[in-house]
């Protein structure tokens, strides 16, 4: 965080006030971990702080310290709206466009008179905050919250609760430190979090070793639906609404499925298409290796975006038409996929 942004934030936090911390729709480990880590930090500074998520988050994150304090907007609309009306400061974490909260909450944010601070590591941030801490090279927003504390000369406030939340966010957003966004600094931050009380083995077990029989069987269905296109170095997975319903689908159950497609030898580009009848869309997750930008692909074709090697998008067409369109687009990228490194 540069000196100018640091000074702005220090002034904003100079006296106690009501602060809201907001994560993106369909919050993942980094969104929840970073928001809760910041929550505990701001509370330690004497601020009246609340975390609001647009909708619910996966069960495998519901052991995190402070998660019971999170307000789910779609479940408590009036309470959330009242909080925005009285807030003096709003932190938006792990997203950089208000569209990422979706629905009515987007309108609430757009009409909110509070000052905004953004902490995020995605590409092409919007210009809505008085202080923006944006760095696409960072492994995760959770890592950025640690650096945020450090820039404010408040690293001494690092508690066990903060450490557990930030470590979980970093671990999940780096694929357990496997992705290329994992830097030497990421490992150094993780070490400091472990020293502060984040028990890495316990966190790993709580996140990854809680598979229900239904989720494991759904993974089997997903792998059975895997389609490999070797000439285009691409693999994709499909899941219909019926397949989800037949396996008692819960939020977060398909987390990481797309990585199985990417793990196939010779594959550079992996995609999972998940039918969502309730929202009348097909949700799409993109992953890649090397310098093939799924951020560009998602932005160009599927109203999405994210990082170079991890992004999301959506299609308003039905599943079959979405797949047909995807297959028709792919040949345009043959050279990029062949030479990705």
Image (cartoon, grey):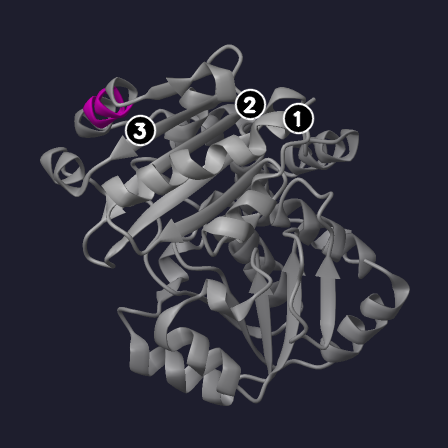
To which residue does mark 1 refer?
Answer: 290
Q: Which residues lie in the magenta part? A: 217-222
Can you see residue 312? yes
Q: Are marks 2 and 1 in contact (CB under 8 Å)?
A: yes
Q: Residues within 10 Å of mark 1 (few under 14, many from 20)?
A: some
- Residue 215 x %, y %: 23, 29
Can you see residue 179? no
Q: Between 290 and 302, which is closer to the camera in this rendering? A: 302
Numbered badge on residue 336? none
- Separation of disc 2 and disc 3 at Cα? 29 Å
Classify mark 3: helix, strand or loop. loop
Classify mark 1: helix, strand or loop. loop
Mark nearer the N terminus (2 vs 1): 2
- Residue 286 x %, y %: 48, 37
Mark nearer the N terminus (3 vs 1): 3
To which residue does mark 2 refer?
Answer: 268
Classify mark 2: helix, strand or loop. loop
Quadrant position of the N terminus in the picture: bottom right
- Separation of disc 2 and disc 1 at Cα? 7 Å
Query: Compared to 18, does 337 lie above or below?
Result: above
In which image quadrant can residue 222 be found?
top left
To which residue does mark 3 refer?
Answer: 210
- Residue 247 x %, y %: 14, 33
Number of numbered markers: 3
Q: Residues within 10 Å of mark 3 (few under 14, many from 20)?
A: few
Q: Is residue 320 left or right of residue 190?
A: left
- Residue 127 x %, y %: 68, 73
Mark 2 or 3: the one toward you: 2
Q: Residues within 10 Å of mark 2 (few under 14, many from 20)?
A: many
- Separation of disc 3 and disc 1 at Cα? 31 Å
């Amino acid at each position: 965080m540069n000196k100018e942004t640091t000074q702005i934030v220090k002034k904003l936090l100079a006296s106690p006030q009501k602060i809201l911390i907001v994560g993106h729709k369909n919050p993942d480990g980094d969104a929840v971990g970073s928001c809760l880590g910041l929550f505990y930090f701001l509370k330690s500074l004497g601020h009246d702080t609340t975390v609001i998520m647009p909708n619910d988050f996966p069960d495998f994150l519901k052991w995190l310290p402070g998660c019971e304090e999170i307000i789910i907007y779609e479940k408590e609309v009036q309470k959330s709206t009242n909080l925005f009306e009285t807030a003096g400061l709003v932190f938006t974490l792990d997203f950089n466009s208000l569209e990422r909260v979706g629905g009515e909450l987007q309108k609430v944010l757009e009409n909110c008179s509070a000052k905004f601070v953004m902490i995020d590591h995605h590409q092409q941030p919007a210009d809505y905050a008085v202080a923006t801490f944006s760095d696409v090279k960072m492994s995760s927003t959770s890592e950025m919250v640690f650096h945020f504390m450090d820039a404010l000369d408040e690293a001494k406030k690092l508690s066990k609760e903060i450490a557990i939340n930030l470590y979980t966010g970093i671990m999940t957003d780096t694929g357990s430190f496997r992705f290329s966004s994992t830097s030497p600094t990421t490992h150094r931050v993780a070490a400091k979090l472990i020293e502060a009380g984040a028990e890495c083995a316990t966190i790993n077990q709580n996140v990854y070793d809680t598979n229900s029989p239904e989720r494991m069987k759904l993974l089997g269905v997903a792998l059975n639906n895997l389609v490999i296109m070797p000439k285009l170095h691409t693999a994709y997975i499909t899941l219909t609404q019926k397949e989800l319903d037949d396996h008692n689908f819960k939020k977060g159950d398909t987390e990481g499925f797309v990585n199985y497609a990417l793990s196939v030898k010779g594959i550079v580009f992996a995609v999972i298409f998940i039918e969502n009848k309730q929202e009348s869309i097909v949700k799409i997750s993109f992953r890649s290796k090397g310098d093939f930008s799924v951020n560009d692909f998602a932005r160009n074709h599927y109203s999405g975006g994210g990082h170079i090697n991890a992004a999301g998008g959506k299609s308003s067409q039905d599943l079959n038409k979405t797949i047909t369109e995807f297959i028709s687009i792919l040949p345009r990228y043959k050279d990029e996929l062949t030479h990705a490194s």
